[in-house]
Amino acid sequence: MAVAVGLLACPARAQTADASDPIPVLEGERILSPGPRALGFDGLAADPSTIGNFQGVVALAYMRARVRDTTGHRWVMVNDIRIFKGDYVSTDGVARRGTFAFV
């Protein structure tokens, strides 16, 4: 079995503020996770968007799998993947359109 692993080189923007950046829904690093509270999520009515003043579409997927590292140690990998596309108001107060994603 052959496995290919690649990295995509992208400019780092997480620490560089820009006037076109969206305003977060919540202060700090808290992100809501919609889903049943019985499974540890924030409830079915929790906002899946992390962008304030956002009007658009959000695609959300939770993935969980058992993986093994190169030393043979087993881990449980849990991923939260979201894609946003729509209109938002940026930190400079300008209405903008954009597409965002995070893993």
Image (cartoon, rainbow, N blue to C red):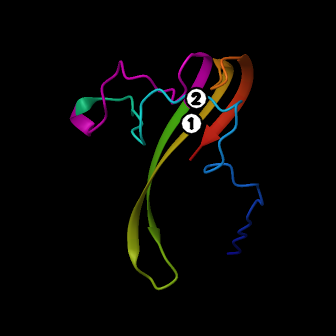
Residue 96: % across, % down = 73, 19
Residue 82 is covered by the magenta coloring: no
Question: Which residue type does callout 1 highlight?
Answer: Arg
Quickly name the residue at label 1: 82
Q: Which residue does the image show at 42% across and 30% down from the upper left?
A: 26
User: Which quadrant would residue 12 be assigned to in this image?
Assistant: bottom right
Q: Residues within 10 Å of mark 1 (few under 14, many from 20)?
A: some
Residue 76: % across, % down = 38, 62
Q: Which residue does the image show at 56% across and 47% down from the upper left?
A: 103
Quickly name the residue at label 2: 59
Residue most extreme to the left: 38
Q: Secondary structure at mark 1?
A: strand
Question: Which residue type does callout 2 highlight?
Answer: Ala
Residue 24: % across, % down = 51, 30
Q: Horizontally, is 9 left or right of 69 in the view?
A: right
Q: Which span is picked out in magenta?
A: 38-59
Among numbered discs 2 and 1, the one appearing first in the sequence: 2
